[in-house]
Image (spheres, rainbow, N blue to C red):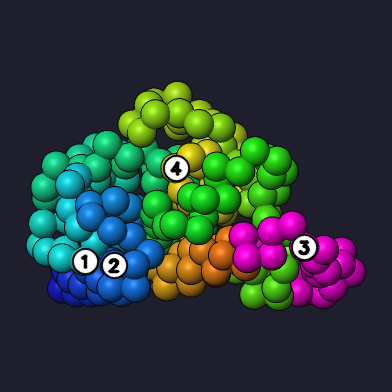
Amino acid sequence: MTAVVSEETRLRDQIASVGKSLFDRSLTFGSTGNISARLSNGDLLMTPTNASLGNLDPARLSRFSADGVHVGGDKPTKEAFLHQCMYCQQKMSGAVLHLHSTYAVAVSILADIDPNDVLPPLTAYYVMRVGNLPLVEYYPPGDVALAEAVSEKAAKSHAVLLANHGPVVAGKTLLDAQYATEELEETSKLFLLLGGQKIRPLTAEQRSHLSR
């Protein structure tokens, strides 16, 4: 029992720490965005509804049972299903981040992006941390139809971009998910800065070396 309690306490504190870091660097704002992490017994800890990631109380995080039932903490975010979809498809994931980060959202609004892989492979770290980034068509926040759309894309990618909304990224650990989300945001910024100019993305051979 002691080990379970210490694991949960550590994870609650880490969620609050990551949330503050993201907020302080303007990767999220107001009460937008949400974070979840999975305990070793399968239960989920998740940031609650209407909570600023910059001022989270670890003790008030929403808690879900392994089968997705809200069992404790504050009222959960209406976007909880986004996290649960990612965990269902990405079985090895221990955490999921969903942000409304400025540059990634801006890219999600562009008309002529490739819906099968939104961003080109501009850097090695983007390829290693994110890889393929499919676009999920627009649904209103909280729409349950979004669950099916996310599940379909997440079956082949641990990161998806919601049209006119923002990224959802899964990782083996909370830090893995954080770093991948940050890499996605920086690559979105680069992509927009390079708009209209001829670019030289990594070749298929260069990408293959990174996955070895």
Task: Specify the segment rendered in magenta.
Answer: 191-212
Q: Are the two marked residues, 2 and 3, in contact with CB atoms closer than 8 angstroms?
A: no
Q: Nearer the viewer, mark 4 or mark 3?
A: 3
> Residue at point 84% right, 73% down?
206
60 on left or right of 177: left
Tell me which amino acid carries mark 4: His
Image point (28%, 73%), residue name: 24
Going from the N terminus, do you reach mark 4 or mark 3 first?
A: 4
Q: Secondary structure at mark 2?
A: helix
Disc 4 versus disc 2: distance between alpha carbons? 17 Å
* Whole-percent x, y for residue 168 in the image: 47, 50
- Tell me, yes or no, whether the two marked residues, 4 and 2, touch with CB atoms within 8 Å: no
Residue beneath disc 1: 54
Q: Amino acid at mark 2?
A: Phe
Horizontal side of 192 relative to 14 (left or right) equals right
Q: Is residue 123 visible?
A: yes
* Residue 109 percent coordinates (x, y): 55, 42
Q: Which mark is residue 1?
A: none
Q: Is residue 37 magenta?
A: no
Label 4 vs label 3: CA separation? 26 Å
Q: Residue type at mark 1? A: Gly
How busy is the neighbourhood of tag 2: few (under 14 within 10 Å), some, or many (20 plus)? many
- Marks 1 and 4 close (CB-CB < 8 Å): no
Residue type of the residue flagged with mark 3? Gln
Q: Going from the N terminus, do you reach mark 4 or mark 2 first?
A: 2
- Establish if 197 lies above or below 141: below
Label 1 with label 2: CB-CB less than 8 Å: yes
The residues tagged by marks 3 and 1 sit, at their Cα atoms, a distance apart of: 36 Å
Above or below 179: residue 97: above
Tell me the SS state at disc 1.
helix
Residue 191: % across, % down? 65, 62
At 29% from the left edge and 51% from the top edge, which residue is drawn? Answer: 32
